[in-house]
Image (cartoon, grey):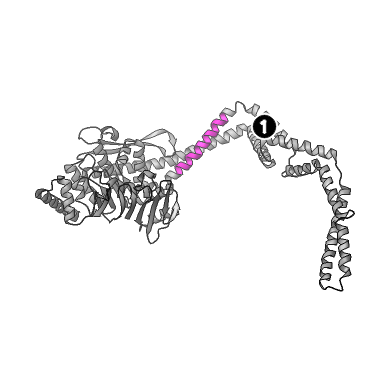
Amino acid sequence: MLASLHVKNLALIDEEEIVFSKGLNILSGETGAGKSIILGALHLSLGDKASKDFLRDADSEAFVEAVFLVDDEATKEALRALDVEPYDDEVIMSRRITDTRSVGKINGEQVPAAKMKEVGALLLDIYGQKEHQSLLNTKRHMELLDEYAKDEIGDLKNQVSACYKQYKALTAELEDAKKSDISREREIVLLEHEINEIESANLKPGEDEELEDEYKRLSNFSRTMEYFGRAHEAMAGDGGVSDAISSAISDIRYIESIDDRASEFLSMLNDADSIISDFNRELSSYMADASFDAGRFNEVELRLNEINRLKDKYGATIEIILEELAARQEKKAKYESFDEYFSELKAKVDKATKELENLCGKLSDIRKKKAKELSEKMKEAMSDLNFLNSEFDVELKRLDYFTADGFDEGEFVICTNPGEPLRPLKDIASGGEMSRIMLAIKTVLASKGGIDTLIFDEIDAGISGRTAQAVSEKLSTVAESHQVICITHLPQIAAMADTHFLIEKSVANGHTISGIKKLYDDETVYELARMLGGSAITEAVLTNAKEMLELAKKYKNQS
């Protein structure tokens, strides 16, 4: 459940913290008081797009933090699958927003907004006007049916999706094979030419690097010998380093018996003399043996030109060229045994089609079974919401092709007046009816378990009187097993609150701010009276508000 929401420097809110309870939490207030800001803050804590326009004070950061209590093992496992570990059964989701960036965190660890949305989807379900409008899209109907049937569907949809992906790849390959059969002979001739071209080069991995080193050495031979010669003259020539060291050795040996350090220095000079003698001998030998081989230089240059030509045509390295060779050899072999390849490919497509047909059939059977269950439960839920003598059904039909979700297409159909035929939901339901139908769907889905917290906004759109009372009773029933948070303008719904919060505007230091407070006893009565009578709070209205509260308590005690 959502334990608390902390909001700071967001729109009209300076700083507020709301501590929610179990059951039905009602948020009410005048139009424009800031109820939508609370919902917006929740959306931000769950990873929705942030804007600097949200900042109340542009020079300070905005901050929202939602704390969730998670005691359900299935939800904990789902969170762990997303690498989120509840600490002391808590998951803390926060967002800091400045005029240049926003930072989201889960349990103190910075995460991208996409992950916040994934985690949030496991913890609460926010229902607003946009969602009941989504019922106009029949694709959403199948999603809701599958959500209702998720316990039986299990991993089946993932299996269908994986099988469909393989099926599509194989059918695409088969289509390509049909097209390529026409130009197969021409392709074989081209492949033979390319294979012979690469094979005749007899390439060896690493050969190009060795040749480039040798080419560099041969092309710079004259310059290299010049510098080696100068180095040899400096070390071994008259007046060079060797003569200087020999002279130094003679001088130090002369004073060896006089100064104790002389022996140490003499030893160092002897070591240096030995090293330099070795250097002079090795360099002299190397220079004597070195010679420029014009023929070899020409061979290296030609070989590098050939390798580089193949690189330009087939790949940046010898290793890639050899991979291209193997690919062409495989393709040529496939073309040469095309009839066998084509026959095997058709068999693979047939096998994948049968497997996909089988999986889609299993999925469809579950959907048909669950569609009947959902229809019956929806009729009950709609009846509770003042849809008297209404009919509801899920019409499923088979597509003539496969999709990643199976081969079913479904649509919700209803009849709200006895004697009329069932018709598509999108064709006959008004905005207020859509709102109640979505509430019915949510209550049916809530009965299946899963998400613990349900948030309703705009649930009272277009309803009043007995229908409003029916909606309030349904929300109260759902709140017996789920935490429900509802923003409403209707006193019938507010009267059912287990916890009631009032959001109101005030002026402080010349600035308008929104605040929120928990209502108790007479405060609750007064707020219901305001919702009933507007600005005129008479004794009759207060009495009506008290009676409404008593009736709500009586209903909750009986249910």
Q: Can residue 40 be seen in this snapshot?
A: yes
Judged by its main secondary structure, the magenta piece is helix
Residue 16's spot in the image, x, y percent?
Answer: 30, 54
Give the left or right position of residue 274, taking residue 459 as reference. Answer: right
Q: What residue do we see at 75% from left, 35% from top? A: 305
Residue 513's spot in the image, x, y percent?
Answer: 28, 49
Q: Hey, what amino acid is under mark 1?
A: Leu
Q: Which residue is mark 1?
A: 191
**Front residue of 160 and 62:** 62
**Residue 312, above or below 512:** above
Image quadrant assignment for residue 216: top right
**Front residue of 192 and 469:** 469
The number of discs equals 1
Q: What residue do we see at 44% from left, 35% from top? A: 402
Report helix, strand or loop for mark 1.
helix
Give the left or right position of residue 510, taking residue 75 as reference. Answer: left
Q: Can residue 82 be seen in this snapshot?
A: no
Residue 422's spot in the image, x, y percent?
Answer: 26, 34
Image quadrant assignment for residue 261: bottom right
Residue 73's spot in the image, x, y percent?
Answer: 38, 57
The quadrant of the image that shows the N terminus is bottom left
Which range of residues does the magenta coloring cover? 159-178
Q: Is residue 495 magenta?
A: no
**Residue 331, above or below 448:** above
- The crowding category of the residue bearing disc 1, from other C-alpha atoms within 10 Å (few below 14, some 14 to 19, many at least 20), is some
**Front residue of 425 and 180:** 425
Q: Is residue 166 magenta?
A: yes
